[in-house]
Image: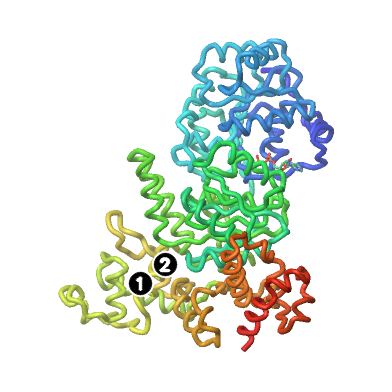
Amino acid sequence: MQRCGTIESVRRMVRDRWGFETFRPLQEQAIEAAVSGRDTVVVIPTGGGKSLCYQAPAAARESGITVVVSPLIALMKDQVDALNARGIASALYNSSLRSDEKRNVIDGLHNGQFKLLYVAPERFPDQNFIDLLHGAGVNSIAIDEAHCISHWGHDFRPDYRKLSALRDIFPDTPIHAFTATATPRVRDDIAAQLKLNAPAFLVGNFDRANLTYRVLWRREMKQRIMTILDRYADKGAGIIYCIRRNDVDELTASLRSNGYDVRPYHAGLSPDIRKANQEAFSSREANIIIATIAFGMGIDRPDIRFVLHTGMPQSIEAYQQETGRAGRDGLPAECVMFHTTADFMTWRAILEKGSSGDDVKIRIAQLEKVLDFCKAPSCRHRLLVEHFGQTYDKESCGACDACLGERDDVPDATVVAQKILSAIVRTGERYGAKYLADVLIGNDTDKVADRGHLNLSVFGLMSEYDTQDIRSWIDQLAAGGHLAVGEEYRTFSVTDTGWTLLRGTSEARLFADDRAKRGAKRERRRRRPVAPDFQDDQSMGTAYAGDGESELDAELYEALRKVRKELADERSVPAYCIFPNKTLEKIAIMKPMDDASLGAVPGIGPKKMEQYGAFMLECVKRFAC
Ligand code: ADP
Ligand code: ZN
């Protein structure tokens, strides 16, 4: 083995070359393990500072190179540039190099010029390349995005399997695996696939306390997204993830027509546009990116204030990674996921097209975990942390829709749950949610009659509820572990945890179905004295009440936007040319009723006043009466 630096020399290096005075959690342990030559599996959430864990020891070593395996060529280049800028000679070796560039790297390796060499995983069966590395003297190997080696991970890459050969090629060289997301199963699989030698497992804290999580049923989404964008106007950046490229294009067009400066990013766009949009985002020229999951690797903006999902993410791991890009500066940031059951179908169709049998099964199991996450009647922070095999100590996180009281608690949830569970037991634990709802509501369908369930004591026991309510609670009880779901059909049986509820030794929490709110809200809205033009689809959703912006009349704001859109369309100009959002916001707060007070609104000069003043005033007045 090559001579290693000491922890003190690494610390000095970190201070001198990076300018960091302290280590982040686990960096020190990871560096100590690297210095002592022990294999590691290091799991640190995105943004936690994984690269320092292998770059700093590599820089402090006196001879040999650290080989870094990384999946993305673009990322490698950024890392190598950054290292060289710090005075740490580094290179990359991959298919993007011209032959003269390759020659330079090879010469540099012969001369012992480099501390780090970045390579793609597919390099490894190549004997010439391996000989070259042997010649240069490999002092350690770092594998970035190591979960890609595992079938159980969310981003399996067949090329990563080739890394299994590393241990045989470099039997005495320490190997350090790094990932942002790995369940205990994936962690073990990484260690097994890489044939690690009694590795130290260093697993960071997965709770991102500064993130607020909300999961909402997808309705009036565009309005709700605009509310969020407005809240963060001029205050940092955001990413909006969509499942399909089409969704990205549509949302981009739609938000642009409403005056928002948003940039799209997906694999169907030309490399030039993608690059330009990514760079604009990184350089803060653009603040909002609408993207598929193709976007995000290597994004290092600390001031991302929100990450929105317009559909279900494909796994909890992906969700953790995507939302993990928010709030890296440690300041509050929010993550909102919109979903419907259709997302499951969409993903399934995508997966079935792109993967083989077993793989599809694993992916679908991962999707089901996301469904459970959406429905589970508990704290989102707790669910995420527990998913990654850690325990969550706090009673309430104070930063999710459940703990903030934004999901409506069902009164007497334990009694409701007991009724449902006893219906399941009484009917023999072999039916699906629709049938159970029929029994509990008291629908005397042919099936219920044929099976003799009209006479059960549970028949009609919950006649005050509708099917949707009961189905939602059954899903919640399943997501909360009280019910087990059949292998073949979605039938339900009671688990041990469920029995503690039935016996009254534990308590249940259930939430009103998010979808059910729609009816109630419509009802409320209909009663408001609003001009007929504005009755349709103007609701802003109630999720954000109490966010400190109560002076802004959200419905008036929406009405003003609609007027602005008509004005813009008539004149064939972008909406922000009529008025920027900020001005509309001010009008919705100040509610001017005459020319003088409208003229006093910041952003309304004499010209705008003359052109559009009357339309704005009319809108405000219509709203006030
Ligand atoms: P990861 O690979 O885990 O997503 P990075 O290695 O890209 O994270 O680091 C994320 C950010 O944190 C970078 O901007 C990096 O400079 C910064 N960082 C890493 N370690 C420290 C530290 N000890 N002190 C301050 N900033 C750090
Ligand atoms: Zn919570």
Q: Which mark is residue 195?
A: none
Q: For the residues labelled 2 and 1, say whether their Cβ atoms are less than 8 Å apart.
A: yes
Q: Nearer the viewer, residue 221 or 363?
A: 221
Placement of 359 over or under 260, stated as above or below: above
Q: Nearer the viewer, residue 481 or 473?
A: 473
Location of residue 105 (image quadrant) = top right
Placement of 396 over or under 119, stated as above or below: below
Report the Cα–Cα distance between label 2 and label 1: 9 Å
Q: Which mark is residue 421?
A: 1
User: Which x, y percent locates residue 337?
Assistant: 53, 60
Callout 1: helix, strand or loop?
A: helix
Does residue 597 appear to the left or right of 197 in the view shown?
right
User: Which x, y percent locates residue 456?
Assistant: 24, 80
In this view, which residue lies farthest toward the left? 450
The quarter in which the C terminus is drawn is bottom right
Indicate if the residue with disc 1 has its beta carbon within 8 Å of ligand 2: no
Of the two numbered discs 2 and 1 on the same chain, state the one appearing first in sequence: 1
Q: What residue is rendered at 82% in x and 41% in y?
A: 21
User: Which x, y percent locates residue 245?
Assistant: 48, 48
Q: What residue is rendered at 25% in x and 68% in y?
A: 428
The quarter in which the N terminus is drawn is top right
User: Which x, y percent locates residue 371?
Assistant: 44, 58
Foreground: disc 2 or disc 1: 2
